Amino acid sequence: MIGKATVIRTVVLLGAVGALEIACRTGAIAPTMVIAPSAMVKALVAAMQSDDFGGHVQQTLSAVAIAMSLAIVGGFAIGALLHWIPFLRRAFNPFLAAYYAIPHFAFYPLLIVIFGLGPAPLIVLATLFAMVAMIVATMAGLDRVPRVLLKTARIHRLSLLQEIWRIRLPAAAPHILSGLKLAVAYSFIGVIAGEFILSTSGIGHEIAYAYDNFDNPRMYALILFVLAIVTTFNMLVWTWERRLARRRGMA
Amino acid sequence: MATRLAAVPAGATRKIHARLEGVTRIYPPRAGHGEVHALGPLSIDLRAGEFLSVVGPSGCGKSTLLDVLAGLAVPSAGTVEFEGKPVRGEVPDGVGVVFQEDASFPWLSVEDNVAFGLRRAGMDAAETRRRVDFAVGFMGLKDFRGAYPSQLSGGMRQRVCIARTLVLQPRLILLDEPFGALDQQTRLLMGDELLRLWRETGATVLLITHALDEANLLSDRIGVMSARPGRFLDIVETGWPRERDSRLAERPDFGAVTARLWSYLRGESLRAMGQGTVAP
């Protein structure tokens, strides 16, 4: 059965795409500004058949995958450590609170000086950008484990490892999962935006290159591609989250 | 002190199941307040198979008393014994605890919640199944085996927690205001179920409550605690028959016991308010 919300969402989406299509075809929007969605798809098909496309995609996605893994694993480990050791937490809390006020991308040139002009500075940038969301979410989740559940663990005489595995982690899971979603999104942003600024390859660079050359069809085609990839990935995470929520009877 | 004869066989009532002797609990000074003398010194013997309630004004250390007896907190002075062995900083085997707050695990189904302790203890699957079936049926959760706590009402979740304790077949059940968050009707019905559970398991029960009627209805004996630092002012024997339920409240002598509890507690509650443990 299709819900009311799904119908409204589909209508809005199709309406917007349709309106853009009509506006572009009738000339209300000049092709130097935006091209018609159908033209974007056509250009994307053409771009995907070009030789270098696969290489750029592979480079971007592998950088995202590495940054994402580092941010999630490292962010979880650091978050758990700060939760466990209160004085470390007190020492680092101000940094965490102010962290997202820093314009990370301003440091990109510095990272290039340090790591060279390869994928490394991009991965470092995206990891730095994504990891703190994971740290903060992990800490929030572990902080909010209800005391009564920890008492229950003691009544069942669980060992420390059992308590962590059977009580603390599942109780903290919803918070940790929302941190994970942010880390995924921030890794994409970090890598692609980094490629925009200064890179010799990758999807972000290709978009910037097309833009500099007034190659509108290719630019929009690539933007469409990025949107499709990110949406697909988000849907995967969302489906997984729904399945977890259903296991708790909350969906 | 003993105002009436208990209906339980004399032999069963004399055996000591758990004992607190000269127990005090003092919290060390912290920012904002000095040393807090929360409890005692107090002594009490729990007789095997009895239903003992503890009532007292807010902040008198009722829950601290339970924590100390359960081994969840270490007394500052005095000794705690369960079945002849000292209790210190660890929950002894055979003790089950149910709290006021919802302690069900939201990530587990009712069935898995109830089986939790048995699985951790390495009980074999067949026996786990048998005990879970029994506890789930006993607590009226049969139709909700596969449900998750988020789909249940507060009263049902508390049943899950009681069932989770029940499967471990505790010989001493400690209840820390287990119905405190429930509405009055649910409380009464849960009280009846608690009595049934107590009768059928033969366990010793200690119930912490602030509801005088509830204590009166459920208990063989009621310990009345003073304002902080909590001590026993008296231990009232109700003398109710072992086969009893919430209709006990219709008896003409029921009100007298509640009135007696209140006569102790009125003054203490006023004192507790003066101490600033209750908002004026």
Image (spheres, rainbow, N blue to C red):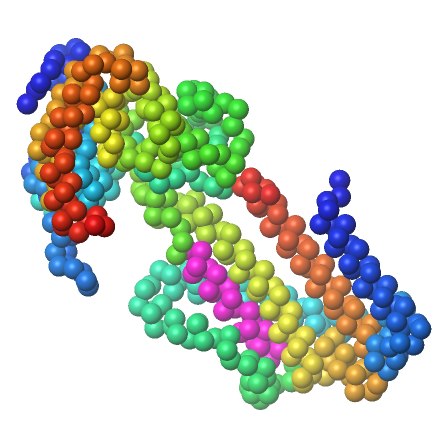
List x then y, in percent, for residue B132: 44, 25
Q: Is residue B149 magenta?
A: no
**Region of the chain picked out in magenta, as a range:** A119-142
Q: Does residue B202 appear to the left or right of A99 in the view shown? A: left
Residue B186, picture quadrant: top left
Q: Does residue B257 appear to the left or right of A209 in the view shown? A: left
**Image point (75%, 53%), residue name:** A8
Q: Does residue A193 appear to the left or right of B7 in the view shown? A: right
Choose between B169 and A22: the one closer to the eye: A22
- Placement of B96 over or under A16, stated as above or below: above
Q: Does residue A220 appear to the left or right of A60 in the view shown? A: right
- Placement of A202 over or under A13, stated as above or below: below
Query: Which corner quadrant holds the N terminus of chain B?
Result: top left
**Image point (52%, 28%), residue name:** B144
Most frequent secondary structure within the magenta stretch: helix
Q: Is residue A122 magenta?
A: yes
**One can see residue A147 in this view:** yes
- Placement of A143 over or under B168, stated as above or below: below
**Image point (14%, 50%), residue name:** B275
**Image point (48%, 30%), residue name:** B111
- Placement of A79 over or under A102, stated as above or below: above
Choose between B168 and B260: the one closer to the eye: B260
List x then y, in percent, for residue A192: 68, 75
List x then y, in percent, for residue A121: 60, 80
